[in-house]
Amino acid sequence: MAQINFDRRFLGSTRGRMIMLLRRNDLTVNGLAAELGLTDNAVRAHLLSLERDGLVTQKGMVKGIRKPHYIYGLSDYARELFPRPYGLLFNRLLSSLRSVLSPSVFIERIRDIGFGIGKENKDSVDTNMNQRVDRAIAAIESLGGSATAASENGQITISSNSCPFSEAVREHPEVCKITESMLSEILETDVVESCDRSLSPKCCFQVRTA
């Protein structure tokens, strides 16, 4: 899929305006043409390009006077490209919990979240550590990270240059315990975080293999 940045310049283009229309409602070629003041053929050309980029997909058909018309809508991939307020909401939720819970109970609740995510991502078919590490990496990536694993002198290190909780970690460093607990559950062993919580947060977890 093409790497698209939904910035102001793109959204001001014809394809960007088409994306915004389809974000609100699924439309036919005729519907898009009427909204954009374009010919049907011009709309089809833009749709073909958007489909190729994985941004638009056919959602079904409706009856027409002479023949059915395809209905187009945004793909799941395209919807994920729009900014969402999850980071802001997560930060505020953590601040609210911290204000009413003792530090030890707050950490306990954070760890419970991680263990729960770990249980959802583990599988009984993973009978050895290599399989569990692969499962752990996939779990981090499902949260928005980009993880790799390295083994040296019997020590496994799982790291990610893209922190899945980057919008919250500087204000609430305890969120690293979510991933730590998640990995511990999936790997079925102790995991210790040594994350970089600087301006560009990076994840790092040491896995106990003995």
Image (cartoon, grey):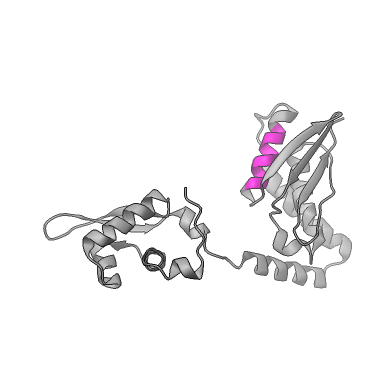
Q: Nearer the viewer, residue 181 or 27?
A: 27
Q: Which residues are magenta?
A: 132-141
| Magenta stretch: dominant secondary structure | helix
How far from the left and from the top, in percent, is residue 157?
80, 39
Q: Is residue 40 visible?
A: yes
In the visual, does 1 lie left or right of 150? left
Residue 88 placement (x, y as % from top left):
66, 69
Quarter occupied by the C terminus: top right
Give the tally of numbered discs: 0
Q: Residue at x 40, y 68 (%)?
A: 13
- Judging depth in this view, the residue of 123 and 147 nearest the camera is 147
Place of residue 79 in the rendered image (x, y in percent of width and height, measured from the top left): 48, 59
Residue at the spot 47% in from the left edge and 47% down from the top edge: 1
Q: Quadrant of residue 71?
A: bottom left
Is residue 99 a member of the stretch shown in magenta? no
Q: Is residue 84 left or right of residue 189?
A: left
| Placement of 21 over or under 191, stated as above or below | below
Q: Residue furthest left?
A: 66
Residue occupying image coordinates x 85% and y 61% = 105
The one nearer the camera, 14 or 61, is: 14
Q: Quadrant of residue 127?
A: top right
Q: For the view shown, which residue lies furthest in the top direction?
A: 127
Q: Is residue 20 above or below residue 73?
A: below
**Residue 183 image point, x, y percent:** 75, 43
Residue 136 sits inside the magenta stretch:
yes
Q: Is residue 94 left or right of residue 66?
A: right
Residue 57 visible in this rendered orientation of the protein? no
